[in-house]
Image (tube, rainbow, N blue to C red):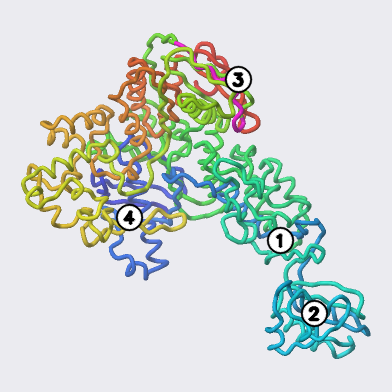
Amino acid sequence: MSKLLIKGAKEHNLKDIDLELPHEAFICVIGVSGAGKSTLVFDVIGTEGQRKLVESLMPSLKYLLGPVKKPEVDSIEGIRPPVFVTRTSRPYGPRSTVGTVTEIYDLLRVMFAKEGEPFCPICGRSVRGYSKEEMAQRLFSYQGRELMILVPVRKGEPIERYLREGFVKAWIRGEIVELERLREGPFDLMVDRLLVKEGALERIRESLEIALGLSKVVKFVLDEGETDYMAVTPYCPLCEFLFPPINPSLFSFNHPEGACPSCKGLGVIGERICVKCGGKRLRKEALSVKLGGWDISSLCELKVITLKEVVEKLPISSLLEGLRREVEKRVELLNKIGLGYLSLNRSMDSLSHGEVQRVRLASQLGMKLSGVMYLVEEPTSGLHPYDQKKVIKVLKELKELGNTVVIVEHNPRVILESDWIVELGPGPGDSGGRVLYCGPLSNFLQLNTPTCLYVRSNLQSRKRSLRSPSGWLTVKRARKHNLKGIDAKIPLGVLCCLIGVSGSGKSTLAIDVLAKGLKRKFRGLPPEEVDEIVIEGEVKKVVVVEQGLFNKDPRSVVATYIGVFKTIRELFAQTFEARLRGWGPSRFSFNLKGGRCERCKGTGKARVEFEFLAELEVICEHCSGTRYEEEVLEVKFRGLNIAQVLSMTIEEALVFFKNFPPVVTKLEPLSWAGLSYLKLGQPLANLSVGEAQRLKMAKYWKVEHKGVLYILDEPSNGLHPSEVERILEVFDNFIEGGGTVLAIDHNPYIVGEADYIIELGPGAGDEGGKIISEGTLEDLKGHIFQFYS
């Protein structure tokens, strides 16, 4: 079927909607935060596609997993296998690198295992290993000569074992001696002594079989003079160094066979570079295997833009030519998407969000899948307009391969490049979940929906006067990562925007240098990777609100995050029924034994993970998803049990707890931030990016702002254009209270409202790390107009 037909979708806040979407098209799903976009794309289309795929490929799973969560939808026809490219809520760990995520490193590991030349890590001479047959043929080639096949015995090793097995001779210091005259090693155990002639091959094979059963290294002596060694793995007889088997695992820093034994493959111990491996992550044996003069770590230290040229010249056999081409293709994809300045050994957790997004997209494009549905979450979020064009091009290439690309996005540039538009709304939560438009882009541009109005005309500036700085923060000679020893002056008491292409050093300057440097300064510690941070004005605290989603721990819910759940549990513990049973607040926690359902440990469900698919959710049969034991639900506060209270929205809770100020005080900021439709027990992992951003900032709404520096990483991330006004009101609140806002953001409306702008660049990676312009918007307008017009 060339269309995806959805009938009666009622998941979360969707209002029984019907949709008809074309396949092999670029589809953009838009709407305000909380309108149901992610629900439609990931929880309905994605989950149902995943469920059908898993059950068709692995039908036995449904018996093992029990009731797999099926989305609330009457029917979906024409669904294709889904591939999720979401903003991961679990940050990449230090073991994930650009090379491992794109799988280029895995391809290189195979190439090095098959074609690499080992060198002794001690003396540097070339060494090799032999198969049993190669050993036999080499020894058989010494026709007419006397041959002794020996096994080296280590110093201190007793001889009793060898006597029991029937060995009687040894070779020591150039002489044959009786084994029983010796007590222990070192010596060479004689396995066989023969004249090499026609018909001796089988005997040689049998003797080698015995010798290799005792040791991986075989020594042979010709005519009681000439000596040499052979081993099943590369061996250096001068240094007596034996390599382990050379296979792809030897080159993996995530495997015990390859990881540096000192740092366990991390390259660092604490915050210091590992002395044993020099930060290369691998054990010395792996680093001593060369291909074209390169070890695998040195190859991965090259910039991607250089790597392709080096790979083209590697001396490999025709059998591995396909591997080489695949490496070249994937490297070229990274170049195409603007990441040529990265190296394969760069840790994913050190990349900016924009870089992470593009690495993941390049990885997907490299797989060359066809006939699937790519479900993509805000691919241009956090990207400079210059980088957005490259991402859009990659998304179109995915479509041209015969795939359906469904994107959740707010960016007008992406919307205008789409084939098909679905707008949900009109509001968030219960006021959303309806289809405002579903059709081609050409018809959409004639409408007056909230998003269409923005796409056609953009938001208008609030036209307020610029604020004057109350002081300055001066960073002197910052040189972390790619920063080129720069001096930066950040104004206090205003909104300052930090802009620049992805990878230019914005997060490094704001978070790694400024925020961490100030925190060290407050503790009386010297600065790191910066000469000095000078404060001219009042700064007594730093708050960093980083972008991205919360972790996937189902125990983290809205009520626990804002700190209201403890108060609610205390109210339940004060009820007559709870006091009669002797229960305290802990009994009403789904994180502690006693009240929580022990079958699911208070999560209400079980999760099963699959590669490239979202997690399958299995509802807990014991508690039916309530998280609690049945007896706990018997206790009620004002007629409702604890699970029912957690099912309330913020708006409902404000009414229910209106006579309890400690609860109301903590709920009000969420209502102000436009999040009154969220439920108290809603897992943080289920929030959209825009919801997560507003929830993080709402947490600071009622705190003391005087002397606080707020560093916000992409605060408009995931927000609909019409919601940016709320973010600016948050900034006003912070600044009017005596604080300072330093925002890393590319949103043109926020940049347009900034009192001061600092631009880093001109490029990314080594080509960035410099301040190329700074001042007010009027000062910079000619320079940045091409991107922000």
Q: Which label's residue is closer to the chain start, 1 or 3? A: 1
Answer few, some or many: residues within 10 Å of disc 1's Cα (few below 14, many 20 plus, some between 14 and 19): few
Q: Is residue 49 above or below residue 183?
A: above
* 2 vs 4, front mark: 2
Q: Which residue is mark 2?
A: 150
Chief SS of the magenta region: strand
Q: Is residue 73 magenta?
A: no
58, above or below 292, in the image: below
Q: Is residue 744 left or right of residue 695?
A: right
Do we see residue 396 in this rendering?
no
Task: Give whichever of discs 3 and 4 has the lower sequence position.
Answer: 4
Whichever of labels 3 and 2 marks the residue nearer the N terminus, that label is 2
Give the number of the disc on residue 76.
Answer: 4
727 left or right of 602 in image = right
Residue 498 on image: x %, y %:
50, 23
Instruction: State which quarter of the image contains the N terminus.
Output: bottom left
Closer to viewer: mark 2 or mark 1: 2
Labels 2 and 1: the sequence-earlier one: 2
- Characterize the local packing of mark 3: few (<14), some (14-19) or many (20 or more) Cα atoms within 10 angstroms: few
Q: Secondary structure at mark 4?
A: strand
Q: Secondary structure at mark 2?
A: strand
Q: Residue 772's mark?
A: 3
The residue to which callout 1 is attached is 320
Front label number (3 vs 4): 3
Mark 2 nearby-residue class (10 Å; few <14, some 14–19, many ≥20): many
Q: Is residue 271 above or below residue 366?
A: above
Q: Amino acid at mark 2?
A: Leu
